[in-house]
Image (tube, rainbow, N blue to C red):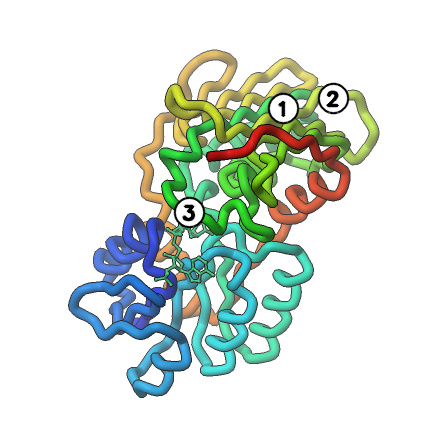
Amino acid sequence: MVFKIAVVGLGKIATDQHLPCIAKNRNFKLVAGVSRHAKVDQVPCFESLGQLRASKIAVDCVALCTPPAVRLAMAREALDYGWHLLIEKPPTPTVGELLAMEAYARKKKRVLYAAWHSRYNKSVDMAKAKLKGHHVNFLKVAWKEDVRKWHPGQEWIWQPGGFGVFDPGINALSIVTKILPEPIFADSATIEVPANAATPIAANIRFKRGDGAAADLSAAFDWRQETGETWEIEIGTKDGMTLHLKKGGSVLFVNGKIAHEAVLHEYEDIYAKFARLLKAKNSDVDASPLQLVSDCFMLGKPVLTEKFV
Ligand code: NAP
């Protein structure tokens, strides 16, 4: 079966990944684009989901690549039209909205796939397998990059629901929540917010284990690093194993020795999985990375920093 798909929110990630991966996947046929300003070649384009619906073009599913703050209303509208959904990360600005979206998809008997792209990586899968059954007592996440390089001109990231530095940071937490054998919890955080923004430019977080056992668990997110990217996760276990995921989780070192270097095909894997979910009529929604981010904001101490210009 070939699923007729429309891509909604024709910005950076739609152009960089969704459209090329749809073109490569024989399970999907792009039938339309939906965006207020941008267009995609070779298919009809509309400014809203309502206009797409009114066109009577047959659609099975849509990929929502808009910013998270506007997703719930768009998701509900698409579900009302009977379309299945793939949504970008972070799925929604709050856990409450994600639960509501999940419930609405269930009510409408449609597939909802909330994708976490950083999880689709063989090195990440290997790390998860290595950690199974071990007691993790050390975690150090460093997720640092230059916001001007990775989010040029994007205003929404600084507005409420835009996540700020937690937009990339949640990628790290999506890996952490996938691979750790037991959940961790936010303990405290310092969240630096520019005086002219609603969302953070940096954050330092302490986590804790659920059983109260001593552990050194932390994450540092920073959008002010202008000298390349640091996307790393170090993990230590009580019995002395060390894991080090580098380059966004694509390279894995175990006990100091390289164990795997993955070729990245995150979005190819996401579309392969979306096809499987559609065929099986199953949804896939994991709120745990969003819950952790939400808890960091709940417990975090906000600190005003200089204006971002
Ligand atoms: P983007 O370049 O700003 O694109 C988002 C598009 O959504 C905009 O171009 C805009 O197109 C549309 N849109 C609809 N309503 C909007 C609103 N109220 N405010 C702003 N834009 C609106 O953003 P992006 O980088 O592609 O990110 C989109 C989502 O993908 C985010 O959740 C992000 O975390 C995720 N993501 C991004 C990357 C990346 O490398 N950038 C990687 C992985 C995941 P129109 O103006 O034409 O409607």
- The answer to whether the beta carbon of the residue marked 3 is less than 8 Å from any atom of ligand 1 is yes
Residue underneath mark 3: 154
Q: Please, what is the three-letter code of the amino acid marked with disc 1?
A: Leu
* Camera-nearest residue between 205 and 256: 205
Q: Quadrant of residue 202?
A: top right
Up/down of 198 relative to 100, above or below: above
Question: Which of the pair 69/119 is nearer the observer?
Answer: 69
Say if mark 3 contacts mark 1, CB within 8 Å: no
Disc 3 secondary structure class: loop
Residue pictured at 50% horizontal, 77% vertical:
77
Question: Residue furthest toward the right?
Answer: 212
Q: Which residue is painted at 45% across and 82% down in the image?
A: 81
Ligand 1 is in which quadrant of the figure?
bottom left
Task: Report the residue marked by disc 2.
Answer: 215
Instruction: Pick whichever, 71 or 6, lies toward us.
Output: 71
How far across and how far down the image is residue 13, in percent? 35, 50
Q: Quadrant of residue 266?
A: top left
User: Does residue 102 appear to the left or right of 7 in the view shown?
Assistant: right
Type of the residue with mark 2: Ala
Q: From the image, state whether disc 3 or disc 1 is nearer to you.
A: 3
